[in-house]
Image (spheres, helix red, strand yellow):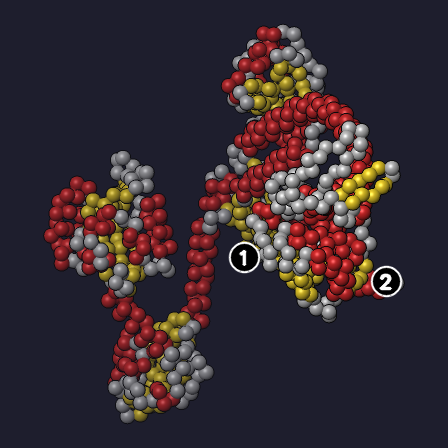
């Protein structure tokens, strides 16, 4: 498109007319016309996008207008940086925008596009971009083919001097007399080919003209040309002479070095000038001895504040650039010793007086025979400030962490507060840091202070002036931080000013210490040497430290309350302990009384029962049939009568001993009752003894089959009396167990007795044993009456039994003793009610250890 037309299209007063015209021609244009408005807030509005957007980007214009960022996603990753930089440069300099790059369409096609635009700064500060984007893929492909062709041609001749070729009039290579080492084509690949095939078209045309002129004139002809080679573009000189009929001899020499020598100084000057002027770092050239500036770049002007004409001809000392004059002398010594200096850190003074830090790199150069210094200054002031802020932040975090650890690990409030003010003063490099207390009863006083010895201490200061105290409190009202950089520039009452003068306070930073909504006091830092600018990180530190101090104070108050509660609790514990001891003494007395009563009653009952048994047994043994027998001066009559016979109607005489008619079955039941009572009394005494002293057993390694066989032999009369049978299925090869034979005999007797007494005669029992989990498990199974699960669970417990319970109290006591005996052995005991009928008693005993077996 004509440049004049484009300018007219971009003209502000022709925009609408241009848009109408563009809309008409955009249909046939292989590109996209756009208008973009970039507002000050960074938002983008697209008033117009031509339909060429569909051809170019495969996107509808509406999609591009809805989200302009979609174009960034289509740009090739290797070209996106250059695209962003071109936009930035154009927006910054208001120069026309021009960019070439690649895009990848949604269908995957790679296209080369060229974008041009002219940004316009609007009255409101917005930028209006009117531009055109064209598809240049065909052109780029042609350029790539041309580059490939040139690469092939430059491989033929590689800038080697004195190459000799025989060439015919029509440009055919007839022979090659000398081959240079960097010629990429062999003789066979050159000879027989035409100039047009091996050389670029322009060089081939020049050569063809020179060949024709040489043959026509018969004189020496010279021509110069350039070729692209792997080493770059090289300059060549060809000398052509007639060597035969319609052929010439061409002597080719590389004259690149000669050509380059002519422009080396000029190019070097241009390059140095560009690097010198465009460098973002300050660059200066100065004399070695005096340091007088010969040349400075724009970055030096920006960094130092001195204009170019102010600096050139002056020395660095005259401009007062060095903060420390010895730094320049040290630099000079280092340069004279080594000739070069790299990244030395120095401080410089700008024209405004501001101190900056820069890294200086310098090298000695020879300039027109005079020794000079080429110096580069890289400003690191901001970096140093950031590093300082990071160090302060690290110190602040460390201080806060250490304070928090002290608060958690110590209950000494005074020590915590004193350490806090000391470390805060060290961090702030302040002259005084203290913590003030605000208390309605105690007034205003200092809890902790750290102060430079050169300045007065506020510790011990006090006043009775309530109005003055209230004014001091009001300075920290509403939980606000009070920041004063210069006392002389604030408006306060004369009393407060006098207070500041008394303690030589020039600047102050005060942060309230709040306990909930109550003002407890303040953490205050003072600068006495002069005014001071309090940095945000310093204010933040005091705010966080005040919160930690508040936590420490609250923790101290809580600990004080806990101490008071502990004291009260100790008194209560002592009182309750005394009461408990008294109750325990009373319980011990009751236990002693119980033991006395139990033994006394049991002794008396046992004596009575045993006496009854002796009498009843004697009566039973002596009264066989009807008759009388004198015993001890008395007469006892035992008469066997039928339960249906009538009683003797004859009454005895009043003073005579009348015979008593008692059936044998009654005497036997009386004997059985007394036996049960005696057994129960013995069981009670045994339980009482084991509860107080424990069951004493003497276990020893025994063969379980032998032990059980001997025990059941002892029980054989009882089994015979009850018409019961016992089948012994205990294996003879079971390992030894640790058991007390006497105690174990009682256990088995009690278990068998339980089965016999709770079942009719004719009971069948089966005894078995096996090894399970390091124990011998013994089982006694009967085919009698079963029990419920609740009865099974309570059978071995000590409890008062129901009078209607099938298990008598005496048997229940014996079952309780069974559990005690087995538990003393280290085993367990239980009972299982079989599904069909009968019970299975089981108990376990530990296996004998090798040490117990080998013990003599």
Q: Circle 1 sits on which residue?
A: 835
Describe the element under mark 2 as helix, strand or loop.
loop
- Disc 2 crowd, CA 10 A, few/some/many (<14, 14-19, 20+): few
In screen coordinates, is 778 left or right of 363? right
Q: Quadrant of the C terminus?
A: bottom right
Task: Answer with left or right where residue 178 lies relative to residue 342.
Answer: left
Give how far across and how far down residue 300 sits, in percent: 49, 44
Q: What residue do we see at 56% from left, 49% from top? A: 788
Looking at this view, is 616 or 357 the one in front? 616
Query: Residue 311: x and y, percent?
Result: 51, 41
Q: Is residue 808 above or below residue 139?
A: above
Give the image quarter of residue 184.
bottom left
Q: Nearer the viewer, residue 275 or 370?
A: 275
Residue 811 higher or lower than 752, as above or below: above
| Residue 830 locus on image (x, y percent) | 65, 53
Question: Few, some or many C-alpha atoms within 10 Å of disc 1 (few <14, some 14-19, many ≥20)?
Answer: few
Taking the spot 66% from the left edge, 13% from the top edge, the residue there is 442
Residue beneath disc 2: 855
- Residue 585 lies, in percent from the top left, at 78, 28
Screen quadrant of the N terminus: bottom left
Say which of 428 and 191 sits in front.
428
């Amino acid at each position: 498109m004509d440049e004049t037309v484009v300018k007219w299209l971009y003209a502000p007063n022709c925009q609408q007319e241009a848009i109408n015209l563009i809309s008409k021609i955009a249909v046939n244009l292989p590109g996209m016309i756009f208008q973009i408005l970039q507002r000050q807030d960074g938002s983008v509005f697209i008033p117009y996008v031509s339909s060429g957007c569909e051809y170019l980007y495969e996107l509808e214009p509406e999609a591009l207008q809805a989200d302009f960022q979609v174009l960034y996603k289509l740009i090739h990753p290797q070209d996106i940086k250059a695209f962003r930089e071109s936009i930035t440069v154009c927006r910054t300099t208001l120069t026309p925008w021009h960019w070439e790059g690649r895009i990848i369409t949604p269908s995957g096609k790679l296209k080369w596009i060229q974008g041009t635009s002219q940004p316009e700064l609007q009255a409101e500060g917005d930028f209006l971009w009117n531009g055109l984007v064209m598809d240049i893929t065909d052109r780029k492909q042609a350029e790539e083919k041309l580059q490939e062709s040139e690469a092939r041609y430059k491989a033929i001749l590689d800038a080697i001097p004195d190459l000799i070729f025989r060439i015919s009039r029509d440009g055919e290579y007839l022979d090659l007399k000398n081959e240079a080492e960097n010629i990429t084509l062999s003789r066979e690949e050159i000879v027989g080919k035409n100039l047009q095939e091996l050389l670029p078209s322009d060089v081939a045309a020049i050569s063809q003209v020179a060949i024709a002129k040489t043959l026509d004139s018969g004189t020496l002809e010279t021509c110069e040309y350039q070729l692209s080679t792997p080493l770059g573009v090289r300059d060549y000189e060809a000398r052509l002479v007639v060597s035969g009929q319609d052929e010439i001899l061409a002597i080719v020499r590389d004259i690149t070095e000669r050509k380059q020598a002519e422009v080396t100084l000029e190019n070097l000057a241009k390059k140095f000038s560009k690097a010198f002027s465009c460098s973002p770092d300050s660059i200066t050239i100065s004399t070695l001895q005096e340091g007088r500036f010969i040349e400075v770049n724009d970055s030096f002007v920006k960094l130092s504040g001195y204009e170019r004409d102010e600096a050139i001809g002056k020395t660095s000392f005259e401009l007062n650039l060095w903060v420390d004059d010895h730094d320049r002398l040290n630099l000079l010594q280092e340069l004279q010793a080594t000739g070069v200096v790299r990244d030395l850190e120095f401080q410089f003074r700008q024209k405004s007086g501001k101190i900056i830090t820069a890294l200086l790199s310098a090298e000695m150069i020879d300039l027109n025979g005079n020794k000079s210094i080429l110096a580069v200054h890289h400003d690191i002031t901001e970096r140093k400030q950031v590093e300082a802020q990071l160090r302060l932040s690290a110190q602040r975090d460390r201080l806060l962490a250490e304070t928090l650890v002290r608060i958690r690990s110590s209950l000494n409030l005074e020590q915590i507060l004193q350490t806090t003010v000391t470390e805060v003063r060290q961090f702030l490099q302040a002259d005084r840091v203290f913590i003030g207390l605000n208390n309605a009863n105690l007034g205003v006083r200092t809890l902790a202070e750290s102060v430079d010895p050169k300045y007065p201490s506020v510790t011990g200061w006090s006043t009775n002036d309530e109005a003055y105290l209230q004014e001091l409190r009001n300075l920290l009202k509403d939980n606000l931080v009070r920041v004063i950089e210069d006392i002389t520039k604030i408006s306060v009452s004369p009393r407060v000013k006098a207070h500041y003068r008394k303690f030589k306070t020039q600047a102050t930073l005060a942060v309230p210490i709040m306990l909930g909504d109550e003002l407890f006091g303040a953490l205050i830092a003072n600068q006495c040497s002069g005014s001071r600018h309090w940095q945000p990180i310093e204010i933040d530190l005091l705010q966080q430290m005040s919160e930690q101090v508040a936590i420490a104070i609250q923790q101290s108050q809580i600990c004080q309350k806990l101490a008071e509660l502990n004291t009260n609790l100790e008194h209560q514990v002592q009182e309750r302990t005394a009461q408990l001891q008294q109750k325990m003494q009373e319980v011990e007395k009751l236990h002693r009384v119980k033991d006395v009563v139990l033994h006394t009653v049991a002794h008396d009952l046992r004596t009575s029962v045993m006496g009854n048994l002796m009498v009843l047994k004697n009566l039973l043994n002596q009264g066989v049939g009807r008759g009388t027998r004198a015993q001890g001066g008395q007469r006892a009559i035992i008469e066997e009568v039928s339960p249906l016979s009538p009683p003797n109607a004859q009454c005895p005489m009043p003073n005579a001993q009348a015979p008593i008619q008692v059936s044998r079955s009654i005497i036997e039941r009386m004997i059985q009752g007394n036996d049960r009572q005696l057994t129960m009394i013995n069981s009670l005494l045994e339980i009482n003894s084991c509860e107080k002293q424990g069951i004493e057993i003497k276990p020893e390694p025994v063969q379980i089959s032998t032990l059980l066989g001997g025990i059941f032999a002892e029980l054989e009369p009882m089994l015979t009396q009850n018409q019961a049978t016992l089948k012994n299925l205990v294996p003879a090869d079971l390992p030894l167990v640790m058991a007390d034979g006497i105690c174990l005999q009682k256990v088995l007797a009690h278990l068998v007795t339980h089965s016999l007494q709770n079942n009719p005669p004719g009971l069948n029992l089966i005894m078995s044993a096996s090894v399970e989990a390091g124990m011998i498990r013994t089982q006694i199974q009967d085919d009698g009456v079963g029990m419920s699960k609740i009865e099974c669970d309570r059978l071995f417990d000590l409890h008062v039994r129901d009078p209607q319970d099938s298990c008598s109290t005496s048997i229940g006591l014996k079952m309780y003793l069974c559990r005690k005996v087995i538990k003393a052995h280290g085993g367990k005991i239980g009972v299982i009610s079989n599904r069909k009928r009968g019970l299975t008693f089981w108990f376990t005993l530990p296996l004998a250890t090798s040490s117990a077996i080998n013990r003599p």
